[in-house]
Image (cartoon, grey):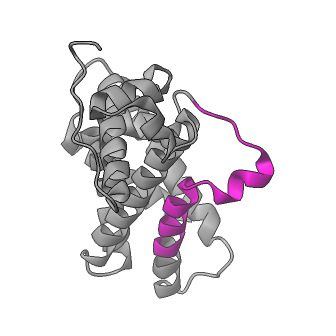
């Protein structure tokens, strides 16, 4: 047995859910430290948790299954935080502004997870399965916020989803460029760009 291996205290009956959470936390830690999905293996995760490799397979059938669970949780977390930002802002336009700024902050504060979510090592899936991808959880939050603003402004319905995607995709582009720069992100400048994008997206 490797000297680096630290065996975990065996789970008691009914503690399988707790072990699953521990596996997910360890995998998330490893992914955010490396930023590369290819460096993650179930055996390495098992070693990090202090369990035998077969124990991981009781909860996740493959590395892809584990990564999918992690990324889905990350999308769920982002969607929940965006909703909270909107609800605490006071009004549809203020809500969109708060969402845009929070989105930028999420990316800057979680750069490696953000890159994993949006695909440095993108795994292409069949188009017929695309509708179930967790990124649409985030898309729905943007669309709901844009719909609320357009309804308040008396805008004609039918373009909500298009405007929401224009805003989100443009914001993602700005964030990606800022994160690619060889120096720390200027949060104030990034927030100002988010405001400018919002004004442009809602001008039409």
The rendered magenta stretch, by its main secondary structure, is classed as: helix
Asked whether the viewer can see residue 100, the reply is no
Nearer the observer, 7 or 80: 7
Query: What residue sits 55% from the left and 56% below the top?
Result: 134
Rendered image quadrant of residue 77: bottom left
Nearer the observer, 112 or 186: 112
Task: Pinpoint residue 8: horizontal percent, then vertical percent.
Answer: 23, 37
54 on left or right of 10: right
For the magenta stretch, what is the residue range?
Answer: 122-145
Task: Pinpoint residue 19: horizontal percent, then vertical percent.
Answer: 33, 49
Task: Pinpoint residue 154: horizontal percent, then vertical percent.
Answer: 54, 87
Asked whether the viewer can see residue 62, the reply is yes
Q: Vertical placement of 88 versus 139: above or below?
A: below
151 on left or right of 115: right
Query: What residue sits 38% from the left and 50% below the top?
Result: 20
Q: Is residue 133 magenta?
A: yes
76 on left or right of 13: right
Q: How many marks?
A: 0
Q: Is residue 132 magenta?
A: yes
Task: Pinpoint residue 42: horizontal percent, then vertical percent.
Answer: 46, 30
133 on left or right of 90: right
Query: What residue sits 69% from the left and 59% below the top?
Result: 131
From the image, which quarter does the N terminus lie in? top left
From the image, which quarter does the C terminus lie in? bottom right
Query: What residue sits 36% from the left and 66% below the top?
Result: 80
Nearer the observer, 81 or 181: 81
């Amino acid at each position: 047995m490797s000297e680096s291996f630290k065996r975990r205290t065996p789970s008691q009956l009914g503690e399988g859910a707790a072990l699953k959470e521990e596996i997910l936390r360890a995998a998330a830690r490893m992914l955010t430290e490396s930023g590369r999905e290819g460096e993650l293996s179930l055996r390495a995760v098992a070693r990090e948790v202090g369990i035998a490799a077969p124990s991981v397979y009781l909860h996740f059938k493959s590395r892809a299954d584990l990564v999918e669970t992690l990324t889905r949780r990350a999308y769920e977390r982002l969607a929940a935080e965006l909703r909270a930002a909107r609800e605490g802002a006071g009004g549809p336009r203020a809500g969109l502004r708060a969402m845009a700024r929070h989105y930028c902050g999420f990316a800057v504060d979680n750069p490696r997870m953000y890159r994993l979510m949006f695909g440095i090592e993108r795994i292409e899936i069949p188009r017929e399965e695309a509708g179930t991808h967790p990124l649409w959880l985030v898309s729905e939050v943007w669309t709901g916020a844009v719909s609320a603003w357009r309804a308040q402004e008396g805008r004609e319905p039918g373009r909500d989803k298009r405007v929401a995607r224009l805003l989100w995709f443009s914001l993602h582009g700005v964030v990606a460029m800022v994160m690619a720069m060889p120096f720390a992100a200027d949060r104030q400048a990034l927030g100002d760009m988010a405001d400018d994008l919002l004004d442009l997206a809602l001008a039409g």
